[in-house]
Image (spheres, coloured by chain):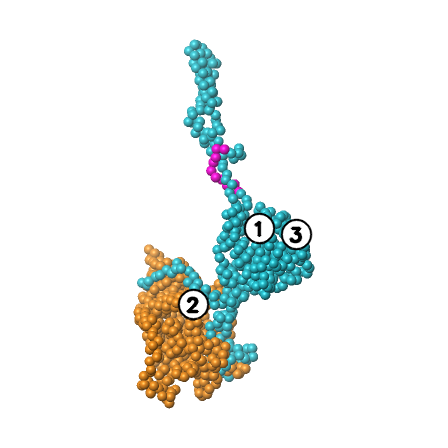
């Protein structure tokens, strides 16, 4: 009797999974997550997929629905090659920031892995998506899937109507500007629902149908002529176009003189998708750290309560330690800082500081050290930070010592790297600030803005690149990208490199020279 | 309780559309790599998957990115062991290197991927949309194989089906009440018993009755045969036509000095195409390479395409060699014989008659097809376009062309000309079969 009772306590045994077990494990994990960590999550939709479908998802930026484009085909070939050669395993899961939160599980996973993945994605990532302010404010989890569905259908219809080549040309150009297609500083307009988009499109179609060239021949009204005097030229037209504008795709979509309505719509689609992914790029460490912290905590709780067997726990721990492995800089396996490892370590460090702080921690983190309530601190951090601010706020000297972090100054003209800071009293804050800086997506991407265009004159589009720390743009790709901008804009484009500190003009490149 | 959806059975190849778009975009470059592959590879190698390098042109995805060799950066690295602030570390490779970010973006475009067979063919034949011609019936019925087809009442004694025959016989014996051996034996035994001890008249009477009975039984047994000719059944065999499953393809080529690189390349494409058609149709396809100058020789593929030989041009030697090989190794009853000859049309003046005679009397009877392509200069193509006169070999073969429907000749100046040869070659076939 006793042994039977113990057996029934286990949520599962053996490696095989089935839907009943998955459901049982999910319910248990969710209950613990909500009660222990006070997680707040979207409802979950779990989808079981095969490895090929996972590759499919990889190549279309992880989304279940995506329009067709050759570059996705290329990425598929690349991912497939790596996978087939065994150079890279596939992810165990994929999670989509949507409501309901979609979690993909690989069919090859063992039951223990499925449990791990459920805790990681369905609880950890899910909580982060729902609560982090970037996602709350900048993405629309409820609308994204129907929007993608609309985008896929719209682009397919455009291909039918205007030909593959024409659609491809617009997509190519828009993809080249994806990095410059996001609002970094002000909030993007809310994703309109599918019906609204549909209505807009109908209106455009109506306008196309009812277009009458006669209207063009009407003399312009006197009022506008007067106000548009040449004197206040540049300043006034900049104001009317709301320049400078950091979102190049937005600017082109709204102001390009050569684009057809459907081309604008395609640019908008690319822009919306870029914007949707922008928060994810800013919260890699936090997102993965949160998910890893959650799965680690939940799995240990399950094990402590005797709900999973030692064998399963061992398998889970093995996978866990693979995921959070961080080789040193001189290790051949080193390929940058592992966001899982950094995120998890920082969050566990917060827990430690809250519960058993040292004198140093009290010095550095007077507001959280020894407060004891680490859950509140973590929930607060997850909700209100992005990578950059999180590191700036919470990277502790103890962790810097543990990781033995150091900063290497790299001047392009110098023959040497110089070790700028190491993990000592003088280095802590410098390392912390440098690491935080390196996670600031806004600062680490080239800052390119539209500064001027004379729509009534030569329509020459002027872009400005604010050069920080003397880091210029790579020539070949810059020229190719400029060509793409030109094809969307329809007239010449020039890009001026201006030093961000001194304001000195460094160079100028125009499509006339290409 | 979450919602579960099992997507494993969803339609596969979700990214097929993307792949097609990608291949279309990289078409020119892929075409070139396939062509190079065919030029250097073997004829039989085309018809399978190929790994090709990632095309470079047209598949770039440019974005604004930082130049690695400018400005000042800071790298934050874990795992410091011995450094102190102010230490100088020489850059690898004399500067410009970047330890923290090994260039993953560069290598992403530098890989090989596999094209399927269909994609390879599509690229190779330059949009010549391989039509359904391949499905046309190329096989010729040349041999028969007996196949069981039920039973028959007549046939050769070797084909008697014993089981059937005995079953019939048994049924007939029961129906006609043929006395069994036991019944006869019983009567005989009774008779013998009585005869050994004939004591009275009554017994004698019954002896006589028994004798009569025995006699009647014997007679009946004789009348109703144990196995009657009507019982006999034979296994019936139908001669089933068997399509010949093996083909041999003769590649004949003039390798004298006048055949340059371009000519050989065109010839090779022609051979590749023929081989492709044959492999689709036959289980086994062999290729025989015969090259000739003023003398002909069977050689291996590499020698065939890459070795030059000096000498005059006597085409008939190649035909003779082919005939000899057929006699020796490929009996026409077992092999479908296809021949493809490529030449620039030069021939020794007096040899043409001999070629006609060889083809007319011997080879055309043996061959399923004989295709002759004459490779001409692109500048000549519009002159010769459709005229009857031409090189000596062309004029000579014209005579054969008229006489034999399975003979094809064609001038080729560019790769695109090759395909129509086959279109004619194989399009004509159904008509031929109907009339036969």
Instruction: Give yes or no for residue B147 being in the magenta stretch.
Output: yes
Residue displayed at 47% across by 14% down:
B195
Cα separation, mark 1 vs mark 2, equals 48 Å
User: In the image, is residue A91 above or below residue B214?
Assistant: below
Residue A240 disc label:
none
SS assignment at label 2: helix
Q: Which chain carries label 2?
A: A
Please name the residue that numbered disc 1 is placed on.
Answer: B404
User: Which of pointers 2 and 3 indicates the residue nearer the eye?
Assistant: 3
Could you say which chain is coloured cyan in the image? B
Magenta stretch prevailing secondary structure: strand
Between B226 and A241, the residue placed more toward the observer is A241
The span picked out in magenta is B145-154
Q: How crowded is mark 3: few (under 14 residues within 10 Å), some or many (20 or more)?
A: some
SS assignment at label 1: loop
Please name the residue that numbered disc 2 is placed on.
Answer: A164
């Amino acid at each position: 009797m006793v042994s039977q009772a113990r057996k029934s306590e286990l949520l599962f045994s053996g490696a095989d999974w089935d839907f009943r077990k998955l459901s049982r494990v999910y319910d248990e994990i969710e209950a613990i997550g909500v009660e222990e960590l006070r997680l707040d999550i979207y409802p979950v939709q779990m989808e079981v997929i095969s490895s090929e479908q996972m590759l499919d998802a990889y190549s279309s930026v992880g989304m279940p629905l995506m329009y067709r484009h050759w570059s996705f085909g290329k990425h598929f070939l690349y991912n497939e090659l790596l996978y087939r050669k065994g150079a890279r395993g596939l992810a165990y899961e994929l999670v989509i920031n949507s409501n309901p939160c979609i979690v993909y599980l690989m069919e090859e996973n063992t039951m223990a892995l499925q449990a791990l993945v459920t805790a990681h994605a369905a609880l950890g990532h899910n909580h982060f998506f729902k609560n982090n302010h970037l996602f709350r404010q900048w993405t629309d989890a409820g609308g994204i899937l129907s929007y993608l569905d609309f985008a896929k259908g719209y682009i397919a219809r455009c291909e039918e109507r205007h030909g593959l080549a024409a659609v491809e040309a617009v997509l190519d150009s828009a993809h080249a500007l994806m990095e410059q297609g996001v609002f970094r500083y002000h909030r993007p307009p809310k994703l309109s629902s599918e019906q609204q988009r549909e209505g807009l499109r109908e209106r455009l179609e109506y306008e196309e149908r009812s277009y009458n060239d006669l209207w063009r021949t009407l003399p312009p009204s006197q009022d506008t002529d007067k106000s548009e005097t040449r004197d206040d030229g540049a300043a006034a037209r900049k104001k009317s176009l709301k320049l400078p504008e950091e979102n190049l795709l937005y600017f082109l979509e709204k102001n390009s003189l050569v684009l057809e309505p459907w081309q604008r719509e395609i640019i908008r689609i690319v822009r919306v998708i870029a914007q949707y992914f922008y928060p994810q790029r800013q919260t890699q460490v936090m997102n993965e750290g949160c998910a890893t912290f959650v799965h680690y905590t939940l799995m240990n709780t399950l094990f402590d309560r005797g709900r999973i067997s030692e064998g399963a726990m061992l398998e889970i721990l093995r996978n866990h330690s693979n995921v959070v492995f961080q080789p040193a800089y001189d290790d051949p396996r080193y390929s940058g800082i592992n966001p899982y490892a950094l995120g998890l370590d920082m969050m566990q460090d917060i827990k430690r500081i809250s519960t058993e702080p040292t004198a140093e921690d009290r010095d550095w983190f007077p507001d959280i050290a020894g407060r004891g309530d680490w859950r509140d601190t973590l929930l607060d951090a997850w909700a209100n930070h992005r990578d950059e601010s999180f590191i700036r706020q919470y990277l502790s000297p103890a962790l810097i010592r543990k990781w033995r972090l150091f900063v290497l100054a790299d001047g392009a003209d110098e023959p040497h790297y110089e070790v700028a800071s190491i993990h000592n009293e003088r280095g802590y804050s410098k390392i912390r600030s440098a690491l935080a800086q390196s996670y600031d997506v806004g600062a680490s991407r080239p800052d390119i803005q539209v500064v001027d265009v004379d729509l009534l004159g030569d329509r020459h589009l002027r872009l400005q690149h604010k050069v920080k720390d003397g880091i210029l743009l790579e020539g070949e790709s810059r020229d190719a990208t400029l060509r793409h901008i030109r094809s969307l804009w329809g007239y010449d484009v020039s890009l001026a490199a201006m030093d961000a500190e001194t304001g000195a003009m460094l160079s100028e490149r125009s499509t006339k020279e290409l | 309780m979450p919602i579960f959806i099992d997507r494993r059975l969803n339609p596969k190849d979700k990214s097929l559309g993307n792949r097609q778009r990608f291949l279309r975009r990289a078409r020119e470059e892929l075409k070139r790599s396939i062509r190079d592959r065919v030029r250097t590879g073997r004829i039989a190698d085309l018809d399978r998957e190929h790994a090709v390098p990632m095309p470079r042109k047209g598949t770039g995805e440019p974005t604004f990115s930082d130049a690695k060799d400018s400005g000042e950066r800071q790298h934050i690295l874990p795992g410091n062991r011995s450094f102190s602030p102010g230490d100088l570390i020489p850059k690898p490779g004399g500067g410009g290197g970047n330890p923290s970010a090994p260039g993953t973006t560069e290598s992403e475009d530098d890989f090989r991927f596999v094209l399927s067979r269909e994609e390879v063919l599509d690229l190779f034949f330059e949009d010549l949309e391989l039509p359904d011609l391949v499905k046309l019936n190329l096989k010729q019925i040349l041999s028969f194989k007996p196949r069981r087809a039920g039973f028959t009442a007549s046939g050769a004694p070797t084909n008697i089906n014993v089981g059937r025959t005995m079953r019939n016989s048994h049924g007939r014996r029961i129906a006609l009440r043929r006395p069994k051996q036991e019944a006869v034996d019983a009567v005989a035994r009774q008779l013998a018993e009585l005869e050994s001890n004939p004591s009275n008249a009554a017994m004698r009477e019954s002896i006589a009755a028994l004798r009569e009975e025995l006699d009647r039984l014997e007679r009946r047994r004789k009348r109703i045969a144990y196995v009657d000719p009507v019982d006999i059944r034979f296994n019936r065999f139908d001669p089933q036509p068997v399509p010949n499953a093996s083909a041999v393809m003769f590649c004949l080529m003039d390798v004298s000095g006048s055949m340059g690189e371009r000519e050989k390349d065109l010839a090779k494409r022609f051979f590749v195409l023929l081989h492709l058609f044959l492999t689709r149709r036959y289980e086994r396809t062999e290729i025989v390479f015969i090259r000739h100058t003023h003398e002909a020789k069977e050689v291996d593929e590499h020698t065939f395409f890459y070795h030059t030989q000096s000498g005059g041009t006597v085409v008939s030697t190649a035909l003779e060699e082919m005939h000899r090989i057929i006699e020796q190794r490929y009996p026409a009853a077992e092999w479908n014989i296809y021949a493809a000859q490529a030449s620039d049309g030069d021939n020794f003046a007096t040899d043409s008659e001999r070629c006609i005679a060889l083809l007319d009397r011997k080879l055309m009877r043996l061959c399923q097809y004989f295709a002759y392509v004459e490779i001409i200069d692109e500048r000549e193509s519009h002159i010769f376009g459709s005229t009857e006169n031409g090189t000596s070999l062309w004029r000579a073969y014209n005579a054969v062309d008229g006489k034999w429907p399975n003979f094809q000749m064609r001038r080729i100046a560019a790769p695109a000309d090759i395909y129509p040869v086959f279109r004619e070659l194989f399009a004509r076939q159904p008509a031929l079969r109907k009339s036969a």
